[in-house]
Image (cartoon, grey):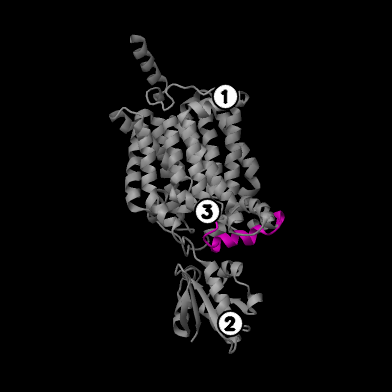
Amino acid sequence: MAKKKEGRESGKKQDFTGECDLDGGFVSPIKTVRDLSLKNIQSLVTASRYFQSLIVLMVIGLFLRFYNLGFNSLWLDETSTYTISVKSFAGIWQVTASGEFNPPLFYWAEHVMLMLGNNEVILRFIPALLGVLTIPLFYLIGKEFLDRNAGIIAAAACTVSPFLIYYSQEARAYMMMLFFVALATIFFLRAMKSGSLIHWILFGVFSALAFWSHFYAFVMIAALVLYALIEWAPRIRTELANLRMLVAGIIVFVVLSLHLIIVTLQLFVLRTSSAPTYGIQGLGIILETFIQVAGMNDIAMYLLVALFIVGIIQAFRIGKNKGIFLVLITVLTFVISYILSFKMPMLPRYLIFLSIVFFLGIAVSYRVVYSLWNTRAVVYGFIILLFVISAPVLAGYYSGFSKEDWRGFSATLQQKTLPGDVVISVPGYISQPLDYYYSSTKAQTKEYGATTAADLDRVTTESGNHTIYYVVTGDISAADPAGDAVQWLKNNTTYVGSDATQLIYLFTRS
C-alpha cells in the first residue's frame, strides 16, 4: 500500500493526469514518427480514451461542418472571394497589392478548388475541412499548455462551437487563419519548453502562413513573441542563446512574409485614412467578441466567461507563467482591437484566434471542479456541458437561413423582370452576390450600380421609361453614411418585397 501511495504522489508531482487519467495508466507506444506502425496504432485506438474521444469529436465535427454546407446562398464577402479567386495567381496577388484588404493565400487555394467546379460546397470546402482539422490542434494546444484533460475539453469546445462552425461554413479566410495560428501556437509552446531551434523555425513558418491567410493574425503572433520575451527575460540576461532561438523564429517569419509586410503597411495607411463606416467600435468589440466566441448566446456567454475567469485564476495557481499567457494574449488583443476600432472597421471574426485562449481557459477550469469532486467524470462532464450549451444555438442554425438568401431572391427577380427592364444594385458592389445567381443576359435586362442619391438620380433618368427594379441591402448605410440614398429611395420608389431573410429588399420606381 505504501508503494502505491508513493507512486500516486510521485505521479501527482510529475503530471497531474496521474490522478485524473482517462487512460488508466496506458502509455502511448507512439512517441515519434518512427514509432508509427499498424500494431502501435491499433494499440492506441483500442486502449486510449483520449484518442478514442478525439476520433469521436472529429467525426462529430466533420458532420457539423459539412452538413448543409451548400444550404445558404453565398453572401457578399463570399462572392467577393469568388470574384478574386477566378483570377490567375499573379492576378490575385495584384488585387492584394492594389488595395484588397485580405492576403492572397486563401484566394490561391480557392483558385485551385474552382478547377473542380463552381458552387457553394466547392467554395466552402477548404474552410470546412480546416475546421475539422483544427479540432485535434486544440487538443494538442491544451496538452502542451497543461495536460491531456485540458486538451480534450478544448477540442470538445472547438468541435461544437457555433462561432467556429459558422466560419467553417463560410468561403472566407478566417478558418485558414485559425488553423495556422493553432499550429504556430503548438510549436510556440513546445519551443518555450524545449528551446529547440526546429520548434522555433516551425513557429515562424506557421506564423507566416497565418499572416498570409489574414492580416490580423499578426496580433496573435506579436502577443506570443511578447510573452516569450517576458517569460524568458531572466534567462536572456544570463544566456543570450535563448534569445537567439526566438530571434531565429522571428527571422523565418519576416523572411517568408517580407513582401506581404510591405504591402500590409501601405494598406494599413489606406485603411485608417478615414473613419470606419461599419463595424463595432470601442468596448462593444470586446463584448460582442465574447458573445460570439462563447456561442452567440447571452446565457452561454455568462457561463463560459465565468469558467474562463475561473480558468485564469487556476492557471495562476498552477504557474504564474500560465496565467500570464492567458491574460496577456487576451488583454493585448482587446487593447489593440479597441484602438483600431476607431480607425478601421473591426468585427469579432477578425479575432477568431482568441477562441484558442478562451477555450484553453475554460478547459483549465476543470482543475477546480476536480479538486472538489475527485473523479474522471469531471472531464466528461465538461465535454457534455459544452455540447448542451451549444445544442440550442446549433439547432436554430441548421433549421433556417443564416445568410442573405441571394439564391431565392435572384430566382424571384428572374421571374419578375421582363426584357428591357433595368435592375439597379444599391450600393453598387452588391451586384457581386446578385450576379452570382441572377443572369441579366438570360433575363435580357440591363444592370447598373448606384450608391449615392446623385447616382440614383442619374441612372434613373438615363433609364427613361423602362421599368426599374432597385435591389437594396443594409450595406447602403455603410456605403452612404449620410443617408441621402435611403431618403431618395423613400421618396421615389415603392417596396415590392424581400428575400426569405428580409435582408435583401426590392423596390420599383413609383
Residue 228 visible, this orientation: no
Q: Is residue 343 left or right of residue 304?
A: right
Q: Which mark is residue 459?
A: 2
Amino acid type of the residue tagged 2 in the rendering: Val
Amino acid type of the residue tagged 1 in the rendering: Asn
Amino acid type of the residue tagged 3 in the rendering: Gln
- Taking the view exactly as shown, the residue that stands out farthest to the top is 2
Instruction: Confirm whether the magenta stretch covers residue 496.
Output: no
Q: Earlier in the sequence, mark 2 or mark 1?
A: 1
Callouts 2 and 1 close, C-beta under 8 Å: no
Label 2 element class: helix
Is residue 206 depicted above or below 281 in this figure? above
Q: Which residues are magenta?
A: 69-90
Camera-side residue: 468 or 229?
Answer: 468
Residue 413 visible, this orientation: yes
Instruction: Confirm whether the magenta stretch covers residue 77.
Output: yes
x, y (%) of residue 76?
A: 54, 64
Q: Nearer the viewer, mark 3 or mark 1?
A: 1
Classify 10 Å Cα crowding around label 1: few (below 14), some (14-19), many (20 and above). some
x, y (%) of residue 425?
A: 55, 74
Is residue 391 depicted above or below 281 in this figure? above
Residue drawn where x is 65% and y is 48% of the image: 259
Is residue 327 depicted above or below 212 in this figure? above
Residue drawn where x is 60% and y is 42% of the image: 208
Q: CA distance from mark 3 to mark 1?
A: 35 Å
What residue sits right under mark 1 in the picture? 40
What residue sits right under mark 3 in the picture? 169
Q: Earlier in the sequence, mark 3 or mark 1?
A: 1
